[in-house]
Image: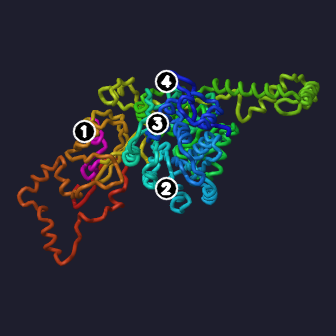
Amino acid sequence: MENIPEDVGVEPTDESLVTFEDLGLAPEVLEAVKKAGYETPSPIQAKAIPALLQGANLLGTAQTGTGKTAAFALPLLSRIQFNGHETSMLVLTPTRELAIQVAEAIQQYAIKLPKVHVVPVYGGQDIAIQMRALKRTANIIVATPGRLIDHIKRGSIVLSSVKAIVLDEADEMLDMGFMEDVDTILKEIPADCQRALFSATMPNDVKKIIEEHLGEYEEARIEGKTTTVENIRQRFLLVKNEHKIEALARVLEGEDFDGVLIFVRTKQNTTEVAEKLESRGFNVAPLNGDLAQSMRERTINRLKMGKLDIVVATDVAARGIDVDRISLVVNYDIPYDTESYVHRIGRTGRAGRSGNAILFITPRERRLLKTIEKATRQPIEAMAMPTSEQISEKRVTAFKNKVKSVVSYGELDKFKALVHAMVEEGCNMENGAVLEDGSVREMTAEDIAAAVIKMYQKKQPLFPELKPLETPKDRREKNRSGRDFIGRDSEKPESEFSGEEKSRLRKERKEGSNGVEEGFLRYYMGVGRMDRVTPKDIVGAIAGEGNISSSNIGRIKLFDRFSTVELPETLPQEVLDILSGMTIRGNDSKFRLMTDEPPTGPRESRESRRGFHRDGDRRSRKFEGDRPFENRKARREKMFGDRKFGNREDRPFRKDHDERSFGDRPFRKTRRFGRV
């Protein structure tokens, strides 16, 4: 085999003073380890191997890339007496890629055990091929849960003779929704079977499996000062969403790397990002679940052999990748949880090597960055965008090395002769056109070399003039006290902005895909034109109650029965709580976040709303005594009792009336029922 993934030891450290020879492994297994050139086990291997050799159940907790595969494979290969016709060992993995990697590693460790055969079983491969392999001999099966269940139902795999079962990357497996399948498989395993579970994190689902199926166990826990590997340099780049692909291209040109793994959220993004990078001259390929299994394996093999430099992948597709060449991980899309971040950057810095991880952050994702730093207990340093000069230096260096490489091989006589001939001929052109007078000016070999270089670098200029990408600014909303919502003093109070600056700032605001201004959220208020409310009333109420500067209040839309207002998404909860209880022109605002859900409670009638107007007292005094409208419903029933009327409150919502937009114009008085 060409590569041995993640599984064997690292260089000696103060924490690991033993060698593989001290652990009591079988001679055949120890010989395979020595053949790979390793002598010292990693910390997780040093703790797990003795426990498994004694036949104990084991819970192993360690970061990715610390050698967990060898931690269970080496002792189980040494301890189990394999029967040529039975499946004695079962390993469950979350993804097909990891199943292949683990199977290859175990086969490598069993190279001196000719009667031990390893069969990987996973979805995406023709099940008939797997059934033929299982019929021959399958002493060790490495499987994904879903495909293993299929084989159990078909009767092609029988687990009654299994002596040891291992759950590798259990946290990721259960997070992918395999909880029920894993539970079913574990119930098929003999009660006296040795069990081992390895996980980088310990969510509730993993704890449930441990309680129900692991029984009495020993624990091999590798505590670290940080959740992530310390030999990985972690940085973040603040970039606007529309500039991400350009920023990615510049980062890839500015960084030194051997192999790169770029993480995106969706399958579609893997293809889009790969195509855009390929158009810029990068050697890149996508990796996602929609690709055929053969194509996915081919992509990983090309990355291993150096025929491919960059892979753009989703979390699931990249889960089993273990390639020594990967020295840089780029989180093009920030993960939604810290566990995914830990697993992502664990693809580099494997088995004690150093690595680099870069995280792209948009302005709205700053909170996620803080969450990751808090969970990993390790600060992520900010990085600057590579400049034109830095990129030019990289390109020139690469060009020089390429030229030197060509010169080193020789066989340039014909080309030298061509250069001499061109020098003797001279140049009879100016600005691309032949001189009419037939004159010829001198042309040196230096001129020819410079012209060839200029022609060569058309697609990728050696001296690029890159436009600076606008760096996102902190959008920290300010209140009237001159302090922003996180308590820092503002650099410039609102009063110091000129009218022209305020106008420019309003124009710079951009609308998001949902019609709401970027960095803002839309809120509902249950007051509108029928309540004689104007935008000025809304601004005054919000600014006064919430102590918010009017410049931080976004667009207001006024309708007959309700209004909407856009406010910064960074508003503290205490401010929102205050606004939820405010009144506007004496009416309860019913302030809440705008959603697709209808408001709860009965709909108010216009008569009930009328009493909240400022002139409500005057109206009530006007009709004091006979109150002509008090028995309107009784008079209607008396006059039209023989007719059937539906409840006015049950009438459907009239879109043509209630949802029409009047913009931000103030309420217009109209002549109705003879009144102005």
According to the image, label 3 marks what residue?
51
Q: Secondary structure at mark 1?
A: helix
Q: Position of residue 29 (x, y in %)?
A: 60, 37
The part of the chain drawn in magenta is 525-543
Numbered disc in front, either 3 or 1: 3
- Mark closest to the chain's N terminus, 3 or 1: 3
In magenta segment, residue 144: no
> Given the image, on which type of amino acid does mark 4 rest?
Glu
Q: CA distance from mark 4 to mark 2?
A: 40 Å
Relative to 494, is 330 on the left or the right?
right
Numbered disc in front, either 3 or 4: 3
Q: Quadrant of the C terminus?
A: bottom left
According to the image, label 4 marks what residue?
15
Numbered disc in front, either 1 or 4: 4
Q: CA distance from mark 3 to mark 4?
A: 18 Å
Res 183 visible:
yes
According to the image, label 2 marks what residue?
160
Q: CA distance from mark 3 to mark 2?
A: 24 Å
Numbered disc in front, either 1 or 2: 2
Q: Secondary structure at mark 2?
A: loop
Residue 650 sits in which quadrant?
bottom left
